[in-house]
Amino acid sequence: MQKTIQIGPIKLSNRLPLAFMAGPCVIESREQYLTTVKKLKAIIAKTKHPYILKASYDKANRTSVDAYRGPGLAAGMKILQEAKQLTGLPLVVDVHEPWQAEEAAQTADILQIPAFLCRQTDLVLACADTGKAINVKKGQFLAPGAMEQIIKKIESRGNKKIILTERGACFGYGDLVVDMRSLEIMKSFGYPVVFDATHSVQKLGAVGACTGGNRAMAPVLAKAATALGIAGVFFESHPDPDHALSDGANSLNFAQAEKMCQQLCAIDAVVKKFK
């Protein structure tokens, strides 16, 4: 039985039309974030598919201590509240510490558990206790079947608004590989499954003090994932990826994002026609 999760006006299910979670990696400024999400809204609106804003107010797991992290919780959530009002769209935001969950939940529609933190029980339970939908990114170190135990943690709090996201698995020391079987395994739990196209092409520590990546491969993997019949695709986009303050190497520019979204919706329509 494939469950349907309601996020504001949007329904997420592995059997419903593909949804997008998209935005820049981190809020660089109020102007940059609002400009980016307005552009992405226009791009995705052409497909007539659902769009959920993606944002980070703090990148707590940067490679270098000198790397830009974001405006912080208070200032960041103020910008995100404005973005929600401006676009009328729901919001997914990552939470790194248990104490942040309740405050982030005042604005966010989905609380996201970062991949590196997916087994942190206190964080998972704090997010579950808010009653908001929870998007759990599967750790790079975790087998897809192990996600069942994380589901049970969230369900133990009476929360069954769960989304599972694949973002690649560690391959050696500095690369990731996507095992498409993991999408099918996670779908077997019944909850909506999302594919994170841009984080799956990261190259960890490839540039010394920062993470590298290969954005050209993001649409390739996203098309393969969409062909399996999933609930959504997560991706990061930036007006000028080569000068982004975080994850620029694997972020898509607007032209790349538009082309990918159109291709994914075409694939999704064919796949789900025969479901």
Image (cartoon, rainbow, N blue to C red):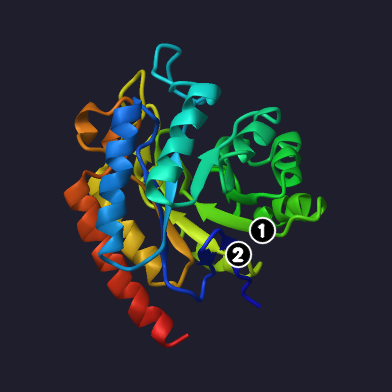
Would you place residue 213 above or below residue 12 in this image?
above
Q: Inspect the image, locate mark 1, and give the three-letter code of the amino acid beneath it.
A: Lys
Q: Inspect the image, locate mark 2, and give the three-letter code of the amino acid beneath it.
A: Ile
Q: Can residue 108 be seen in this view?
A: yes
Q: Residue furthest top?
A: 66
**Quadrant location of the N terminus in the rendered image:** bottom right
Whether the residues at callouts 1 and 2 have beta carbons within 8 Å, the answer is: yes
Q: Residues within 10 Å of mark 2 (few under 14, many from 20)?
A: some
Q: x and y percent of residue 180 in the render?
A: 45, 62
Q: x and y percent of residue 127 in the render?
A: 69, 41
Q: x and y percent of residue 99 in the render?
A: 70, 27
143 or 34: nearer the viewer: 34
Gap in angstroms between the C-alphas marked 1 and 2: 6 Å
Q: Mark 1 = which residue?
A: 161
Q: Is residue 237 visible?
A: no
- The residue sitting at 49% across, 51% down in the picture is 90
Q: Mark 2 = which residue?
A: 5
211 or 157: nearer the viewer: 157
